Amino acid sequence: MACGISDALYWSLTREELVAVLKVHAARERSANLRAGLVAATICNTNPYRKKGARRIQPGDFFRSAKREHMSVAEAQKFMNGWASTINKDAAAQGGK
């Protein structure tokens, strides 16, 4: 499962708890990206062959933070119902394991 949580934990969480877990995961990912960007920016900014007066490179320049489009409640329900149907079919095909 994404975010390092098991399927069992995922299904036992309330919606609010899941949102909190996902926010914490997103914050960790952003911190990791900024740390990596800081190293890369430092290397670029201290390059002796860099042009004088060039714009200082920022840690965030090395990754993009795309705006996420959120599903409506109806879209989310349709997606989850389809996903659950697929999982149930696979489980039935494997003898209910």
Image: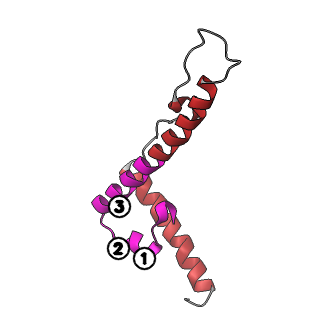
49 with respect to 34 (left or right): right
Q: Are marks 3 and 2 in contact (CB under 8 Å)?
A: no
Q: Label 2 crowding class (10 Å Cα cut-off): few <14, some 14-19, many 20+?
A: few
Q: Who comes first in sequence, dot 3 or dot 2?
A: 2
Q: Distance between the residues labelled 3 and 1?
A: 12 Å
Query: What residue is rendered at 35% in x and 61% in y?
Result: 18
Q: Who comes first in sequence, dot 3 or dot 1?
A: 1
Q: What element carries label 3?
A: helix
Amino acid found under the numbered disc labelled 2? Ser
38 with respect to 47 (left or right): left
Residue toward you, 49 or 76: 49
- Can residue 92 be found in the magenta stretch? no
Question: Where does the magenta region start and end?
Answer: 1-29
Rendering coords of residue 4 (x, y %): 48, 65
Q: Are marks 2 and 1 in contact (CB under 8 Å)?
A: yes
Residue at the spot of label 1: 8
Rendering coords of residue 7 (x, y %): 46, 73
Query: What residue is rendered at 63% in x and 84% in y?
Result: 93
Q: Distance between the residues labelled 2 and 1?
A: 6 Å
Judge whether 33 appears above or below 1 on screen. above
- Can residue 28 be found in the magenta stretch? yes
In the picture, which quadrant includes the C terminus?
bottom right
Residue at the spot of label 3: 18
Q: Label 3 crowding class (10 Å Cα cut-off): few <14, some 14-19, many 20+?
A: some
Query: What residue is rendered at 40% in x and 47% in y?
Result: 27
> How is the model colour-coded?
secondary structure
Judge whether 16 appears above or below 28 on screen. below
Q: What element carries label 2?
A: helix
